[in-house]
Image: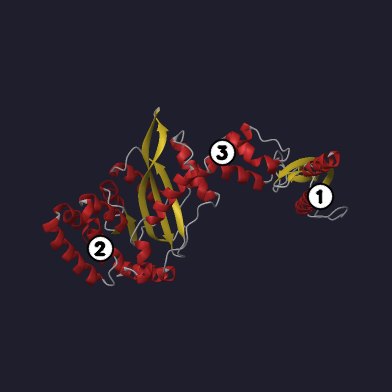
Amino acid sequence: MAKVIMNKELKQAKLFEPDPLQKLIRDEIRRVIEKTLGAELEEALQASSYERTEGRLGYRNGIKSRELGTSCGKVEIDAPRGLLFKKDGSGSTQTQEFQSQIIRRYERRAKQVDDAILGIYLSGCNTRRIKNALKPMLKGVPLSKSSISRLIASLRQGFEEWMSKSLADKKIVYVYADGFHVKVRSAGRVCKMPVLAVVAVLETGEKELLSLVMRGSESADAWKGVLQDLVDRDLRRPALVIADGGDGLLSAIATVWLGVKIQRCTFHKQRNLLEHAPKHAHEEVLEDYHRIVYAKTLEAARSAREYFLRKWTKRCAGVAKSLQEAGDDLLTFFQYPEAQWKSLRTTNVIERMNEEFRRRVKTQSSLPSEDAVQFVLFGLFASGQLSMRKIDGWEELREITARRKMEAAT
């Protein structure tokens, strides 16, 4: 019996012994970091160790021991120090301490650890959960509430820079604009507020998020402010805007981009049709509606629409009136390459953003502020946790751009 207990205790003890593989990995990380820092210093000095040349820009000044948190635990490194020659305004030569751009002076964690912290925060976790989740990774590396706060502050700065940067170099073809509502604490109460989002399709086919703004409503003035800000940042006029059927957004588009082509989101219109129909008629309404939006040609779509209006004007006038309200803006996608129709029919790219956001914050009844909503959404993109694939038929986008130039010239 005593032997069995002893064997059990030995096995338990081994569980808490240092993992030799982890130690080897940490040693290798330390070696690579030190070698990289040494190469960085040589580049700054324009000379290797003990090399005497006329072009030398400084000299080494010993080493400094530092601790750095990595995904394999704490690593102790010997960081090389150096003094660089710098000329002041009078032409005199002064010395300045070398500062590594790979590991900043006060940096105590590798970027991958910081990325993990931000990733967990963006999943809706609080500070305590972050610390508990990262405890196996940090292995003794300190992680205070202020450290996490500084990381979030860096996210704020990144968001503000992104929302103000110039868009002059963006060769856009299409723009998606839509709003979705989230629960947030604002003015002392939890309420639902809209996030107004704009996504562009570039000539390369890639989709790029351009703007995320929280407003009190989806009014014309609110949307006009969002679109005008993009224009003020030198965004080029798009060939087509894919939008929901909200009066505020449509009015803003007509004001900011007068005469631009509009594709009304067919999914939003489908939802609207069903709201006007009794439940027992939903299947039939959908069948007739799909004949329009999934037609093979524009002529077939118009024929199906005429049939829909004749039929439902008699059976349920509200359904027919709702379809008629959208007019030809529901069929604009037929003017573009067939390979792109699926991508141009709806604003699903923004709907998916909404779904991913809800999944990330489902453990929280609401977010504490409007800023928090914007930071979480922006952070999902900035950290690569939320990405958008290229538009279908992207190979034909350059032809559309060339056609627009020819039309403008004539």
Labelled disc at residue 337: none
Which residue type does callout 2 highlight?
A: Glu
**Which residue corresponds to mark 2?**
287
Residue 35 in the image: above or below residue 140: below
On the question of residue 283 being in view, the answer is yes
Pick out the residue farthest to the right. Answer: 50
| CA neighbours of label 1 inside 10 A, class few (<14), some (14 to 19), many (20+) | few
**The quadrant where residue 89 appears:** top right
Q: Percent x, y for residue 271?
A: 28, 53
Secondary-structure class at tag 1: helix
- What residue is at 82 percent from the left and 42 percent from the top? 4
**Which residue corresponds to mark 1?**
20
Pick out the residue farthest to the left. Answer: 314
- What residue is at 31 percent from the left and 43 percent from the top? 218
The answer to which of marks 3 and 2 sits earlier in the sequence is 3
The answer to which of marks 3 and 1 sits earlier in the sequence is 1
Secondary-structure class at tag 3: helix
Residue 18 in the image: above or below residue 36: above
The one nearer the camera, 134 or 162, is 134
Left or right: where 170 falls relative to 113: left
Please identify the quadrant where the N terminus is shown: top right
Pick out the residue farthest to the front. Answer: 1
Q: Percent x, y for residue 215?
A: 36, 39
| Labels 3, 2: front one | 2
| CA neighbours of label 3 inside 10 A, class few (<14), some (14 to 19), many (20+) | many
